[in-house]
């Protein structure tokens, strides 16, 4: 049954049923084959963690997983009882008695992540989870408050400023961030990615709880750990490169923490034209680098064998990312962007002292055809 055409047909039936049911209505599905129930429950998180590598019917399976994920309420799935004749012919929708709650489609669109998103649970645990729903919301709010407090502390300690919560949230939406980096920072501030703190709640399921711990460092895998502390190849190399570039710019780098990342949109490093560029580079390098570390981590988690990226790979990725940003900045000065166009002076000030063979470039390199690259 596993990986057969019959299973593909059954998955297709599920997909049709899910698509035909409004996202806010509970959906109960009975299946003829217990293998498909197991596939979508016990096995799916691991399959997703492994990026569907080596899985038959992966196309339809990932479609089913995605359609379930879009649902805003729970989906129930079980094998049809043997005496239920009606269920023998095809997948039957809308059963009345459900023994097992097997899939919890994430009700919060903010809860997106690259690894497993659906969790399989026993019924007892599912009921517990429902009871704890309020508690979960409450603790996510706690984590968010903690993150904002870290951000405020960082601004007070480093920049001697005392921003309000509102100002911190505004800083997270700074127009100098790429859309992706802005999304990443806001999600991080909300503690909305499925990292260790979330898996920790499944303390009765050692198989789920294992996701909470960083295998290399043996500590809870919080976003702060991933971005600033983890010993897996990634964060250290990236922040070393940031330091190198920032010191070329003429500033002293200080060791990174979550507060600095979350407030990188706020500091003003001076009032004149040239220091406006410094503040802008600061926002760009911190926001883009933090997101890159998250992407490197996701790729490692999805790798079959958890293999880490090499230092050289990480270095190349970071340099390519910075060069791409430099190129976009250069293009965005074009007058065709009208009001959205960037000021040439600002772009020159942003990248000044960071470029490769900078003394050989024309003063206004934006207008030229020469290749301009970050000098690291
Ligand atoms: Zn770690």
Image (cartoon, rainbow, N blue to C red):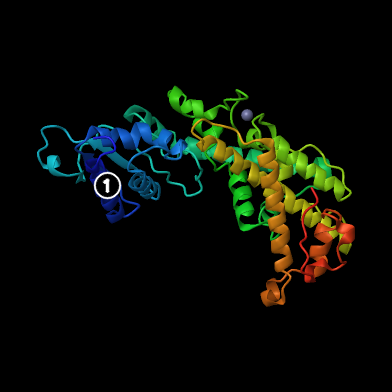
- Tag 1, which secondary structure? helix
Residue 265 visible (yes or no): no
Q: Picture coordinates of residue 133 (x, y %)?
A: 44, 37
Q: Is residue 318 left or right of residue 344?
A: left
State the residue at coordinates (36%, 32%).
Answer: 43
State the residue at coordinates (64%, 31%).
Answer: 232
Q: Nearest the camera: 142 or 312? A: 312
Q: Picture coordinates of residue 86 (x, y %)?
A: 11, 42
Q: Is residue 351 left or right of residue 233?
A: right
Q: Picture coordinates of residue 194 (x, y %)?
A: 52, 38
The quadrant in which residue 216 appears is top right
Residue 162 visible (yes or no): yes
Name the quadrant where ligand 1 sits.
top right
Q: Picture coordinates of residue 117 (x, y %)?
A: 45, 40
Q: Nearest the camera: 154 or 35? A: 35
The quadrant in which residue 270 appears is bottom right
Q: Classify 10 Å Cα crowding around label 1: few (below 14), some (14-19), many (20 and above).
A: many
State the residue at coordinates (25%, 36%).
Answer: 78
Q: Quadrant of the N terminus?
A: top left
* Residue indicated by mark 1: 14
Above or below, 117 against 355 in this view is above
């Amino acid at each position: 049954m596993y990986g057969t055409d019959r299973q593909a047909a059954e998955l297709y039936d599920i997909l049709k049923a899910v698509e035909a049911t409004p996202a806010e209505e509970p959906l109960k599905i009975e299946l003829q084959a217990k293998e498909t129930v197991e596939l979508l429950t016990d096995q799916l998180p691991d399959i997703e963690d492994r990026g569907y590598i080596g899985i038959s019917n992966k196309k339809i399976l990932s479609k089913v997983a995605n359609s379930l994920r879009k649902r805003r309420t729970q989906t129930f799935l079980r094998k049809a009882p043997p005496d239920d004749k009606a269920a023998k012919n095809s997948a039957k929708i809308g059963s009345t008695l459900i023994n097992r709650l097997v899939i919890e489609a994430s009700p919060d669109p903010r809860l997106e992540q690259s690894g497993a998103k659906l969790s399989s649970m026993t019924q007892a645990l599912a009921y517990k989870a429902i009871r704890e729903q309020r508690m979960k919301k409450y603790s996510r709010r706690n984590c968010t408050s903690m993150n904002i407090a870290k951000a405020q502390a960082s601004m007070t300690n480093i920049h001697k400023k005392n921003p309000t919560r509102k100002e911190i949230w505004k800083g997270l939406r700074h127009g100098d961030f790429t859309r992706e980096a802005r999304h990443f920072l806001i999600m991080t501030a909300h503690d909305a990615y499925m990292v260790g703190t979330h898996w920790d709640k499944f303390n009765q399921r050692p198989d789920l709880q294992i996701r909470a711990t960083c295998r290399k460092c043996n500590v809870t895998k919080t976003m702060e750990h991933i971005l600033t502390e983890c010993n897996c190849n990634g964060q250290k190399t990236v922040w070393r490169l940031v330091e190198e570039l920032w010191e070329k710019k003429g500033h002293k780098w200080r060791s990174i923490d979550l507060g600095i990342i979350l407030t990188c949109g706020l500091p003003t490093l001076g009032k004149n034209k040239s220091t406006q560029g410094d503040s802008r580079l600061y926002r760009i390098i911190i926001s883009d680098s933090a997101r890159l570390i998250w992407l490197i981590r996701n790729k490692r988690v999805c790798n079959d064998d958890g293999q880490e990226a090499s230092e050289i790979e990480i270095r190349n990725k970071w340099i390519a990312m910075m060069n791409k940003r430099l190129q976009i900045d250069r293009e965005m000065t074009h007058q065709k962007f009208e009001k959205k166009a960037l000021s040439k002076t600002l772009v020159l000030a942003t990248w000044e002292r960071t470029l490769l063979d900078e003394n050989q470039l024309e003063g206004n390199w934006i207008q030229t055809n020469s290749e301009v690259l970050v000098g690291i």
